[in-house]
């Protein structure tokens, strides 16, 4: 199988902090206001015998905790996962005690047990969500067997045990389903956000490397004049000092070293990547692919780059028709990543075929390795999809990064397995490469 190695630190957490203090405080104030409104409406609006004193005491305890959080922490501060899990666990226990005082699962507001678990699934990790879900399940189970009577206008009213058991089953199913679904969707969003950030880092790294040539050229230009002056002075000193004296040898050494510095600066001033504004900045696409593959060559694997005609045969004199393209970090990094990946898993050969058609350019990368796993073939390109099991720092972001970078140039990437064995990556520009000439 063929996967691109990414450069992210596998031990670095995706996120170290979750929800902001202000958001959690506001949500809890809204929940507490709803609890107070429900108690007042049932007690005074419907005239039901609600145990107001203990119920309001439970609400007050939660309000005091919320006040303490609001006063001691900056609203813009983001809570750590353990802190957010603690407050959500407290909310579950507070709601469970409130339900115990007002009829247990017979109370229609028992479905509010879903809220803290759903919030946890969207902002916390898997372990915290599972623990909170288990706490909610235990609380719901306890409420089925022990609770105070449901406040009702007519004394002695209670629901049948079979009906309460059905409510418990529905609540358990809803807790598990909502938590799993919300966590799954939120995790995909988090992974996509992290993968996009990794793509931006890779592109920024390539751009910084490209900018080094310009910095070197600027340094060579600025230092050229002072070194020329030093060379002139050293030459005059060497001419005037007596031959064979120590000072004459020092002047000759100074002259040779200044010339050496000028040669070094001249070599640094040669920009390895042509300026995009120059007429000869574009290079043939096969030369660009060879440039992208150069850092990933291995002695035991041959990388063959060839131009094919429409029948799929080898290079048949089409080199004069090969289009030129302006090198860019997206093209170099994207194609280079796929070639590096093929080289890592190839047995002996990696073939890169270039097919030029009217307004369409196709680059096919094939290796003679084990190929892609069938179970993951349709999911390749999604972030964190890898057949290596996150071993040796492989997190499954490389394919996503390469596809994203090439997508910025208008490319469409497809994955397949060769009939004779090995992986096949097809990079196609349906409307031409950005910068194609």
Image (spheres, rainbow, N blue to C red):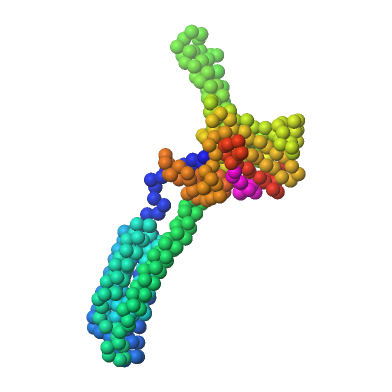
The count of marks equals: 0
Range of residues picked out in magenta: 405-416
Nearer to the camera, 343 or 90: 343
Asked if 44 appears above or below 302 in the picture, the reply is below
Nearer to the camera, 58 or 370: 370
Left or right side of 347 for 55: left
**Residue 315 visible in image:** yes
Nearer to the camera, 132 or 195: 132
Asked if 75 appears above or below 413 in the picture, the reply is below
Q: Residue at x 55, y 39 (%)?
A: 371
Q: Which quadrant of the structure image shows residue 279?
A: top right
Q: Is residue 117 magenta?
A: no
Q: Residue at x 39, y 50 (%)?
A: 13
Residue positioned most to the top = 244
Left or right side of 429 for 9: left
Asked if 354 appears above or below 377 in the picture, the reply is above
Q: Residue at x 42, y 65 (%)?
A: 177
Give the x, y percent position of residue 171. Answer: 37, 71
Q: Which quadrant of the structure image shows residue 360?
A: top right
Asked if 92 appears above or below 357 in the picture, the reply is below
Left or right side of 101 for 269: right
Give the x, y percent position of residue 314. Answer: 71, 32
**Residue 272 visible in image:** no
Give the x, y percent position of residue 304. Answer: 62, 30
> Where does the C terminus fall, quadrant-wise?
top right
Give the x, y percent position of residue 417. Answer: 59, 41
Residue positioned most to the front = 162
Nearer to the camera, 165 or 111: 165
Q: Is residue 407 magenta?
A: yes
Q: Residue at x 38, y 57 (%)?
A: 125
């Amino acid at each position: 199988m063929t996967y691109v190695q990414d450069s992210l630190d596998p031990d670095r957490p995706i996120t170290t902090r979750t929800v902001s203090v202000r958001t959690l405080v506001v949500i809890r104030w809204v929940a507490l206001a709803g609890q107070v409104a429900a108690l007042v409406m049932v007690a005074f609006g419907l005239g039901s015998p609600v145990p107001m004193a203990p119920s309001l005491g439970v609400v007050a305890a939660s309000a005091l905790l919320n006040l303490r959080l609001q006063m001691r922490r900056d609203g813009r501060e983001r809570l750590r996962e353990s802190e957010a899990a603690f407050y959500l666990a407290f909310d579950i226990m507070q709601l469970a005690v409130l339900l115990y005082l007002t009829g247990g699962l017979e109370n229609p507001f028992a479905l509010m047990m879903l809220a803290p678990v759903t919030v946890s699934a969207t902002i916390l990790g898997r372990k915290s969500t599972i623990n909170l879900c288990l706490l909610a399940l235990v609380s719901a189970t306890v409420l089925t067997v022990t609770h105070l009577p449901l406040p009702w206008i007519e004394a002695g009213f209670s629901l049948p045990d079979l009906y309460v058991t059905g409510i418990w089953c529905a609540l358990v199913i809803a807790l598990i389903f909502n938590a799993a679904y919300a966590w799954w969707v939120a995790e995909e969003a988090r992974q996509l956000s992290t993968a996009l950030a990794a793509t931006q880092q890779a592109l920024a790294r390539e751009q910084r490397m490209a900018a080094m040539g310009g910095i070197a050229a600027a340094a060579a230009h600025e230092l050229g004049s002072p070194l020329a002056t030093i060379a002139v002075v050293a030459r005059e000193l060497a001419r005037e000092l007596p031959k064979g004296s120590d000072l004459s040898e020092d002047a000759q050494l100074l002259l040779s070293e200044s010339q050496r510095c000028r040669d070094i600066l001249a070599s640094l001033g040669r920009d390895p990547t042509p300026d995009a504004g120059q007429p000869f900045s574009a290079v043939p696409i096969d030369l660009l692919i060879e440039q992208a593959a150069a850092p990933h060559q291995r002695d035991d694997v041959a990388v063959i780059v060839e131009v094919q005609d429409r029948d799929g045969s080898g290079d048949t004199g089409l080199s004069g028709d090969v289009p030129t393209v302006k090198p860019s970090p997206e093209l170099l990094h994207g194609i280079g990543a796929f070639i590096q990946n093929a080289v890592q898993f190839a047995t002996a050969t990696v073939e890169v075929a270039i097919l030029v058609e009217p307004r369409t350019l196709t680059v096919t990368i094939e290796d003679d390795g084990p190929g892609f796993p069938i179970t993951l073939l349709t999911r390749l390109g999604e972030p964190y999809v890898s057949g290596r099991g996150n071993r040796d720092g492989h997190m499954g972001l490389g394919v996503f990064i390469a596809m994203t970078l090439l997508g910025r140039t208008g490319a469409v990437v497809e994955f397949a397995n060769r009939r004779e064995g090995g992986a096949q990556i097809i990079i196609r520009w349906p409307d031409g490469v950005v910068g194609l000439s």
